[in-house]
């Protein structure tokens, strides 16, 4: 029997019942929608705890909900991922203390409006384009990555999963703009929390020896290591304390302070003080990450004690039942780091499997009917949350480029602006859903790594542009040159674009031996980086800001 046959009609009823309930709540909380201030800023009247919950829900996408347990389940998975929370919290405090004061000096709708006022329309267009390209790739991939395990455990075609996510995202955004987005996000956050706690309790209940045995066994196999003090620039040193302190804050300053996806939520509060509270208190979302890591540890110990069933092996490694025994013989198993004792836990990636499937497969296989539907509804909701959030952000930034509503230089009425805003939501909803469907059939083109790596290309330059805007100094020409140089600098240490060009036959692998930051694996025919991408966040920030401040050109006189 295939794993998806365990997902019953009752589970489907729970999934759609939850989505319909959330839709009703979003409709009930939408408030008046007479102006674009109501639509894009929630009338600047939303309570800061709700905004904070929305920030957390947007941050914890479906990728996080299923990917974090999978990250720990992988070969050398442990709690060192949590170190990045240090840099994230540092950044939120800076954004909440300083950035929001700047934004609340005027009635603006995005950080790019502020940049345009301070440094001119060219800078606003540049920042908006960086945001748009990164958002289309990044959020489409988040929807796809959430839809893939949903397809596996529900048996529904992946295109149907994507279309369901797209329809609800467009509907929720059209219904009440940012008010509906934020209140539905709050419900997603509560479901993440409840679903995660239920899953952890159920897992602990199935482990012989309970909580203490879970912690002890996970510790013995090195799964609870939480601090990595090593320093270096190699890609294997991704989750270290030094990266968390000196690189991650730059990424998170960009994501929470300059990226419209997150920043738009801050604009919905009544005052700058409340907006600051919303972003700073959203740090408690790191506790959800802790919860998901604990789930990953509990999954590891559960399967260490009980092993995978043939059904689970077949699903996680995507092989027919006739090849299950071959997988068991050929797969790599986790080992005790000291005694080299072999566990019953296979490493999915060692045989073409996916550790990200482990948690959804366990949900459907181990939880009672109805309860599994509730938790998988959380994965659906997380994907919808990622998409409806970006629809509101893209709609606003597109409208702003067309009409500059913050300057009030247009001749359109509020009703006309509202109509255009809603049409833009539909346009971007269809475009992103279509792009996600295209990604789902692009089997041999490595777009996923490129999309996931987009923040490395865009976060540093966007933050550099914003700091120049605060200083009131910087030229469009300099910032443009800085952003372009930053793009090529990232290309020197990331393989995503090169892999894409190689797959599309535009480039031969051997042509890249001139780059000292990349190495060619002759045996596997692959390209690997010698440099950790995370260090490019502060480097590209400094490059963009330096060129913006010191490269000659016409400077904007606005303040």
Image (cartoon, rainbow, N blue to C red):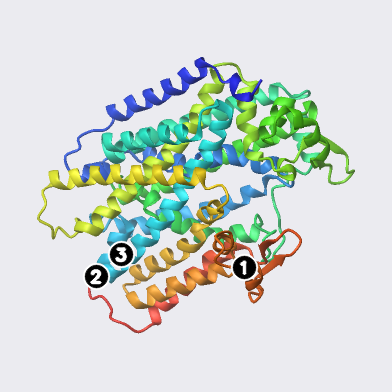
> Counting other residues with Cα less than 10 Å from the Cα at mark 3, is it few (<14), some (14-19), or many (20 or more)?
many
Q: Nearer the viewer, mark 2 or mark 3?
A: 3
| Residue pointed to by mark 2 | 559
Q: Is residue 34 above or below residue 102?
A: above
Residue 220 located left or right of residue 380: right
Q: Is residue 281 visible?
A: no
Whole-percent x, y for residue 307 in the image: 78, 28
Q: CA distance from mark 2 to mark 1?
A: 50 Å
Q: At numbered mark 3, what does the secondary structure look like: helix, strand or loop?
A: helix
Q: At numbered mark 2, what does the secondary structure look like: helix, strand or loop?
A: loop
Q: Is residue 390 above or below residue 191?
A: below
Q: Is residue 256 above or below residue 512?
A: above
Question: Image quarter for residue 116?
Answer: bottom left
Using the image, tell me which numbered label, if any, was put on residue 125: 3
**Residue visible at 50% across and 53% down?**
451
Question: Image quarter for residue 107?
Answer: bottom left
Q: Nearer the viewer, mark 3 or mark 1?
A: 1
Q: Are marks 2 and 3 in contact (CB under 8 Å)?
A: no
Whole-percent x, y for residue 542 in the image: 48, 72
Q: Nearer the viewer, mark 2 or mark 1?
A: 1
Q: At numbered mark 1, what does the secondary structure look like: helix, strand or loop?
A: loop
Ranked by sequence position, the earlier of labels 3 and 1 is 3
Ranked by sequence position, the earlier of labels 2 and 1 is 1
**Residue visible at 67% across and 49% down?**
80
Using the image, tell me which numbered label, if any, was put on residue 508: 1
Q: CA distance from mark 2 to mark 3?
A: 18 Å
């Amino acid at each position: 029997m295939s794993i998806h046959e365990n997902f019953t009609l009752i589970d489907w009823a729970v999934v759609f019942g939850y989505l319909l309930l959330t839709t009703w709540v979003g409709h009930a909380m939408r408030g008046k929608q007479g102006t674009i201030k109501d639509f894009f800023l929630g009338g600047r009247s939303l309570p800061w705890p709700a905004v904070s919950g929305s920030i957390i829900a947007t941050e914890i996408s479906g990728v996080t909900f299923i990917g974090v347990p999978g990250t720990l389940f992988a070969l050398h998975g442990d709690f060192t991922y949590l170190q990045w929370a240090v840099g994230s919290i540092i950044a939120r405090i800076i954004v909440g203390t300083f950035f929001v004061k700047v934004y609340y000096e005027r009635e603006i709708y995005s950080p790019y409006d502020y940049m345009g006022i301070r440094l001119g329309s060219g800078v606003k267009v540049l920042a908006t384009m960086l945001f748009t390209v990164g958002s289309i790739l990044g959020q489409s991939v988040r929807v796809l990555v959430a839809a893939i395990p949903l397809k596996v455990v529900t048996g529904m075609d992946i295109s149907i999963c994507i279309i369901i996510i797209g329809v609800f995202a467009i509907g929720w955004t059209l219904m009440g703009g940012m008010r509906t987005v934020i209140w539905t996000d709050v419900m997603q956050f509560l479901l993440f929390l409840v679903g995660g706690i239920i899953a952890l309790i159920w897992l602990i209940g199935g482990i012989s020896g309970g909580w203490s045995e879970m912690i002890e066994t996970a510790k013995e196999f090195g799964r609870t290591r939480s601090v990595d003090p090593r320093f270096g620039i190699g890609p294997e040193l991704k989750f270290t304390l030094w990266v968390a302190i000196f690189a991650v804050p730059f990424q998170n300053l960009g994501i929470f302070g300059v990226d419209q996806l997150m920043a738009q939520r801050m604009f919905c509060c009544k005052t700058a003080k409340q907006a600051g509270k919303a972003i700073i208190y959203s740090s408690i979302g790191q506790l959800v990450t802790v919860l998901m890591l604990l789930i990953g540890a509990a999954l590891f110990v559960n399967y260490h004690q009980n092993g995978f069933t043939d059904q689970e092996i077949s699903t996680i490694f995507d092989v027919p039942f006739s090849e299950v025994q071959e997988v068991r013989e050929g797969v790599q198993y986790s080992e005790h780091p000291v005694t080299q004792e072999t566990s019953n836990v296979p490493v999915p990636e060692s045989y073409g499997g996916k550790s990200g499937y482990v948690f959804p497969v366990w949900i459907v296989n181990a939880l009672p009917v109805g309860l599994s539907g509730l938790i998988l509804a959380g994965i659906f909701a997380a994907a919808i949350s990622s998409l409806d959030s970006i629809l509101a952000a893209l709609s606003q930034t597109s409208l702003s480029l067309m009409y500059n509503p913050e300057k009030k230089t247009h001749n359109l009425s509020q009703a006309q602006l509202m109509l255009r805003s809603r049409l833009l939501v539909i346009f971007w909803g269809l475009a992103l859903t279509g792009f996600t469907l295209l990604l789902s059939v692009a089997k041999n083109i490595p777009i996923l790594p490129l999309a996931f790596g987009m923040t490395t290309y865009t976060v540093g330059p966007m933050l550099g542009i914003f700091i120049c805007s605060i200083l009131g100094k910087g030229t469009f020409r300099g910032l443009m040159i800085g952003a372009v140089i930053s793009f090529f600098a990232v290309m020197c240490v990331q393989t995503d674009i090169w892999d894409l060009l190689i797959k599309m036959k535009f480039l031969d692998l051997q042509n890249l031996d001139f780059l000292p930051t990349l190495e060619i694996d002759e045996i596997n025919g692959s390209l690997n980086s010698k440099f950790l991408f995370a260090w490019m966040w502060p480097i590209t920030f400094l490059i963009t800001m330096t060129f913006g401040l010191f490269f000659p050109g016409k400077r904007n006189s606005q303040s």
